[in-house]
Image (cartoon, grey):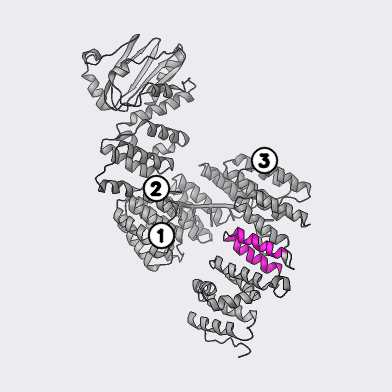
DNA sequence: GTAGGGTTAG
């Protein structure tokens, strides 16, 4: 067989493998075109992994390709363009081949810049920056010298990795080699800097670029706009937009989308919507991404009506909702607990012929699990698992997490154990789920070792730190039910989190109703309110209180020996975190405002209370006794010492109004 | 053949 007959009888993968083997064993290797045809056919049969494994596992073919670098090299772009998962082994075979044969230097194999660029781009986009770089170095040795595009590809990859120093070094290297960087080079680096928030460096580079007579284009401005918006600096971004208009560069849809996104990030979807309308007036056509930004913005503010309205608008106006859009709206519906609507939308999505992706399935499973629809979740999972297509570790993470949080610990554990047999490696999320989830807790219970107050507080803090409010709430309820309560450090953390993001408070409705302890929290928040009212608050009160032993179990006598010198004009707030109900006597010297937050139980007890001195506890009272009361676990006493009546009345009014 | 915008999961 001399001329290769590319027949019509390739029907299955086996046929093509047989054919390929024939091809590589022919005395005169078939032409590149023939190889390409065959690979394309195989690719069309969607046997991606099989094609790949031919390279890495089949020694014969691999060896052949090693010696036909030109061939392999030319086939590679087909893989990359078709989005076939790229195997490093494949690449290594190629490189080894090139080096082994020294083809590059012998001019036998000379892929041109375009082939190199395609391969490099494919590699870098798959995260193989190192390999891409070594390919560049290889080019430098050969006859096809790297051009600006080859450099740009690597510079961009380095920037995307956040490796700006390396990117800039490479740019300097280009300059030395008389390949002056262009606008693409600068845009990549500016983007990298923006994403790292390096605004000063960004400005410097911008001027450097202009000094070299390389002028920013619409992409440059969009990079800046986007970077600013992602930091919430919408005003600055609008300024950039004004500036670009001044320079004669019209903002495009991407500019507007970036700013709309910025508004939504700040929780102002209406602002985004106004810009959207403004843009339409300017005759700039919105696209599906504009809609997604708006829909997501409204979803995150739980304004589902507005989100749904936009969603319907898409269907009416023409561009079909994409999987992306469906994912966004599904997430939004699940977030507000509208499971029924979510299910309907999912059904609609399927009947519209929109193919669900990993996001869709993750969102569905997560939504079901979060709302306790465990059976639904499991049956969907089973169905998906049977189909076998969408499986990766993150998919399983969702399921394992869902199972854990719903008490199906054995199932979660079994799935975890099954991972390796499926060739899936648990990642950091998998382990964190297993560790922080119910699993370990139940495990310890299973061994007759029961969680105590500390265990619960540690768990709760863990969830708080990573903003898993719903899990935190689950534990909070459980621990309260078992008679445990938040300790001072948990409260502190919670207060700090709420201070940063007040909406967290809304996410824990049980906080006010069911947890005895929470007057403590509310008082901590009060402290913050007071500070913001402009009342001086002694910042070291906590250390003072701590140093007086208030964090530990407190006896009345310890309390009694407390000696605080109140300085007039200072607001003192001290929190008492005691583990047993005690009698607290607060004695103050100056005009005093005392607020005691007590739960109903405490107040009931207080009503039948006669005199603190009737207890057998010794109490040393100094100064004037302004308030005597029973303090229960987690109660707090506020003492405001001030010479200024108006301060006190302001506070008083606030407290009465607020509570 | 290179640069810019949107959705989850610990």
Q: In the displayed structure, does residue A312 sit left or right of residue A482?
A: right
A36 or A105, nearer to the observer: A105
Q: Residue at x 34, y 31 (%)?
A: A518
Q: Secondary structure at mark 2?
A: loop
Q: Which residue has dot 1 on it? A: A346
Image quadrant where one finds the N terminus of chain A:
bottom right
Work out whether residue A199 can be spotted.
yes
Label 3 CA crowd tier, 10 Å (few <14, some 14–19, many 20+): few
Label 2 CA crowd tier, 10 Å (few <14, some 14–19, many 20+): some
Q: Residue furthest bottom?
A: A1
Q: Residue at x 52, y 81 (%)?
A: A16
Measuring from the top left, give residue A443's x and y in whole percent: 29, 49
Q: In the displayed structure, does residue A225 sit left or right of residue A273?
A: right
- Which mark's residue is nearer the viewer, 3 or 1? 3
User: Magenta span: helix, strand or loop, mainly?
Assistant: helix
Cα separation, mark 3 vs mark 2, equals 41 Å
Query: Do callouts 3 and 1 mark residues in contact (Cβ within 8 Å)?
Result: no
Measuring from the top left, give residue A569's x and y in whole percent: 47, 13
Say which chain tag 1 marks: A
Label 1 CA crowd tier, 10 Å (few <14, some 14–19, many 20+): many
Cα separation, mark 1 vs mark 2, equals 16 Å
Image quadrant where one finds the C terminus of chain A:
top left
Q: Residue furthest front?
A: A100
Q: Which residue has dot 3 on it? A: A200
Say which chain tag 3 marks: A
Q: Which mark, residue A336?
A: 2
Q: Which residues are magenta?
A: A111-140
Label 3 vs 2, first from the N-terminus:
3
Q: Secondary structure at mark 3?
A: helix
Q: Can marks 3 and 2 be said to lie on one chain?
A: yes
């Amino acid at each position: 067989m001399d001329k290769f007959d590319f027949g019509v009888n390739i029907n299955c993968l086996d046929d093509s493998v047989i054919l390929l083997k024939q091809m590589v064993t022919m005395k005169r290797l078939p032409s590149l075109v023939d190889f390409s045809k065959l690979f394309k056919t195989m690719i069309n049969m969607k046997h991606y992994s099989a094609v790949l494994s031919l390279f890495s596992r089949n020694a014969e073919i691999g060896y052949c390709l090693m010696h036909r670098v030109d061939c392999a090299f030319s086939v590679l772009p087909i893989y990359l363009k078709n989005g076939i998962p790229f195997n490093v082994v494949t690449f290594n075979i190629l490189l080894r081949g090139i080096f082994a044969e020294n083809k590059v230097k012998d001019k036998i194999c000379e892929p041109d810049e375009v082939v190199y660029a395609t391969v490099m781009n494919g590699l870098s986009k798959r995260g193989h920056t190192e390999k891409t770089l070594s390919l560049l170095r290889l080019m430098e040795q050969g006859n096809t010298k790297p051009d600006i595009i080859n450099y740009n590809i690597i510079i961009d990859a380095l920037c995307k990795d956040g490796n700006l120093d390396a990117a800039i070094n490479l740019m300097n290297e280009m300059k030395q080699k008389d390949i002056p960087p262009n606008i693409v080079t600068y845009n990549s680096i500016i983007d990298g800097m923006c994403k790292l928030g390096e605004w000063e460096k960004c400005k410097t580079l911008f001027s450097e670029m202009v000094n070299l007579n390389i002028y920013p284009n619409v992409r440059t401005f969009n990079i800046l706009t986007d970077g600013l918006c992602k930091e919430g600096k919408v005003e600055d971004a609008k300024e950039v937009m004004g500036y670009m208009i001044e320079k004669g560069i019209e903002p495009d849809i991407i500019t507007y989308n970036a700013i709309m996104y910025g508004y939504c990030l700040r929780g102002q979807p209406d602002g985004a919507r106004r810009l959207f309308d403004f843009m339409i007036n300017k005759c700039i056509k919105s696209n599906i991404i504009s809609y997604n930004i708006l829909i997501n913005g409204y979803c995150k503010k739980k304004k589902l009506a507005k989100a749904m309205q936009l969603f319907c608008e898409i269907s009416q106006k023409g561009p079909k909702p994409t999987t992306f859009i469906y994912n966004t709206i599904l997430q939004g519906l699940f977030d507000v607990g509208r499971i029924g609507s979510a299910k309907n939308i999912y059904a609609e999505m399927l009947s519209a012929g929109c193919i669900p992706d990993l996001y869709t399935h993750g969102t569905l499973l997560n939504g079901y699990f979060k709302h306790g629809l465990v059976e639904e979740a499991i049956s969907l999972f089973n169905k998906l698992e049977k189909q076998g297509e969408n499986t990766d570790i993150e998919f399983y993470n969702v399921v394992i997490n869902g199972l854990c949080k719903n008490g199906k610990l054995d199932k979660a554990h079994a799935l975890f154990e099954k991972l390796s047999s499926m060739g899936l490696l648990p990642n950091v999320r998998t382990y964190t789920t297993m560790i922080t989830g119910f699993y370990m807790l139940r495990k310890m219970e299973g061994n007759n070792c029961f969680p105590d107050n500390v265990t619960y507080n540690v768990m709760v803090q863990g969830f708080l730190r990573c903003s898993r409010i719903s899990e935190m709430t689950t534990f909070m309820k459980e621990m309260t039910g078992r008679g445990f309560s938040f300790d001072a450090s948990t409260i502190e953390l919670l207060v700090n989190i709420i201070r940063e993001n007040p909406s967290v408070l809304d996410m824990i409705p049980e906080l006010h109703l069911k947890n005895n302890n929470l007057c403590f929290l509310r008082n901590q928040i009060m402290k913050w309110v007071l500070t913001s009212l402009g009342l001086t608050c002694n910042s070291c009160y906590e250390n003072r209180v701590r140093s007086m032993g208030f964090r530990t179990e407190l006896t009345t006598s310890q309390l009694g020996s407390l000696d605080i010198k109140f300085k007039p004009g200072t607001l003192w707030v001290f929190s008492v975190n005691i583990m047993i109900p005690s009698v607290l006597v607060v004695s103050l010297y100056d005009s005093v405002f005392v607020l005691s937050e007590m739960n109903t139980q405490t107040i009931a007890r207080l009503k039948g209370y006669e005199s603190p001195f009737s207890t057998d506890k010794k109490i040393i009272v100094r100064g004037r006794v302004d308030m005597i009361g029973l303090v229960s676990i987690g109660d707090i006493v506020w003492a405001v010492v001030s010479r200024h009546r108006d301060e006190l009345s302001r506070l008083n009014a606030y407290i009465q109004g607020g509570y």
